Image (cartoon, helix red, strand yellow):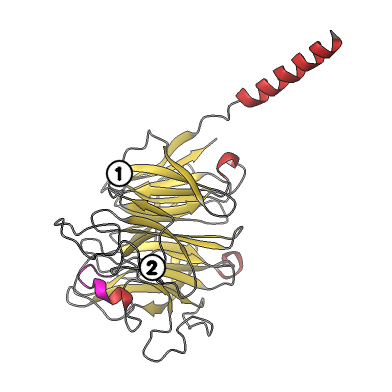
Amino acid sequence: MMVRRALAGLLMACLGTATAAAPAPRIETIASGLDHPWSVAFLPDGRVLVTERAGRLRVIAKGQVPGSISGVPKVYEASQGGLFDVVLHPRFASNGLVYLSYAAGTPAANFTRITRARLVGNALVDQKVIFEVSPPKNTPVHYGGRMAFLDDGTLVMTVGDGFDFREQAQRLGSGLGKIIRINDDGSIPANNPFAHKKGAQPSIWSYGHRNEQGLAFDAASGRLYEHEHGPRGGDEVNIITRGGNYGWPIATKGVDYSGASITPFKTYKGMIDGIVIWVPSIAPSGLAVVRGPMFPEWDGDLIVGALAAQEVRRVDLDAAGKVVGQQRIFPEIADRVRDVRVAPDGAIWVTTDDDAGKVLRISR
């Protein structure tokens, strides 16, 4: 009898643990009425920087109407062009350095550029252009523009293929269709894979990309994750490696917008396949790795925003980085999602792509 009671007590305790659900996520609107908010960055004092595609950098403090940061460089705003990403230097607390990516130039010759500046109060000062993509192009689309710092202090940025110039993605003499890697001052790291290759652009870190709209470095695993738009289908998530060739346009799971074939190859020897492929397209935008105490059941998983699918999606990864599943999360969010980020406290932030866009915070 005593043994049965002990076993029954143990069973009840286990059932209680198993059925104890985590608190439901809470979605709050932090700001609204923003003009196509593109990216967010979290300041040490609790304020949040938000880029608007039209060329404004906003600052959000809790309980206050979003303010503006002065000194933002002039951007080329047309179609997909404008102000893109904002990231903080790893030692921002001591040096105040902020990095902006944006479209620059003219309709006939435009490109993606990185400017570095110091944030002093609500102003950017000591601006310096540290990188420009070459060659310029005459299309206002497929800029890339996502940035991330690696654990060695170097900065990586995605660069799209310019849409009409997809063959450039395979050419090492072109900056289009690449991920580039530079030092924090814009100089070229000596250990870049093509730094000493004749005819190659020394900034190239990886190539064979189409239009990369998500980039996230996970310090815990050492992996650099990226996602990019396919044409009609063939969106993909990749783990980026030094010097890797990711196939575009020689290999793709998608077809042209007309329905015509782009290539006979879905894979190709020596080219790296995505760990996730979406057919039909979801138009992924924004990428983050979940870390921190707020969503421990998702630790190490990827959070992906989607423009066409109008959703936030979780990609479930095992410890080795293998995809074991995916699902839509936060179904209350049914807007074009431009960016997703994980804040220092573990909360998930989302921006919606609209001329009256929102900044959302999901927490427990």
Residue under label 1: 309
| Quadrant (top left/top right/bottom left/bottom right) for the C terminus | top right
Classify residue 309 by image quadrant: top left
Residue 275 shows in this picture: yes
Q: Residue at x 40, y 78 (%)?
A: 131
Q: Is residue 10 above or below residue 320?
A: above
Q: Residue furthest bottom?
A: 198
**Amino acid type at image mark 1:** Ala
Total tally of numbered discs in the picture = 2
Classify residue 51 by image quadrant: bottom left
Q: Nearer the viewer, residue 227 or 143?
A: 227
Q: Main secondary structure of the magenta part?
A: loop
Q: Residue furthest left?
A: 258
Could you say whether the residue bearing mark 2 is in a helix, strand or loop? loop
Q: Is residue 194 above or below residue 302?
A: below
In percent of width and height, residue 7 lies at: 78, 17
Q: Residue furthest right?
A: 2
Q: Residues within 10 Å of mark 1 (few under 14, many from 20)?
A: some
In percent of width and height, residue 88 lies at: 51, 64
Q: Does the stretch in magenta take in 12?
A: no
Left or right of 83? Residue 59 is: right
For the record, the magenta segment spans 161-167
Q: Residue at x 40, y 63 (%)?
A: 146
Q: Nearer the viewer, residue 27 or 61?
A: 27
In percent of width and height, residue 323 lies at: 49, 49
**Amino acid type at image mark 2:** Tyr
Q: Residues within 10 Å of mark 2 (few under 14, many from 20)?
A: many
Residue under label 2: 246
Work out whether mark 2 precedes mark 1 in sequence or the reverse, and give the earlier one.
2
| Number of the front mark, 2 or 1 | 2
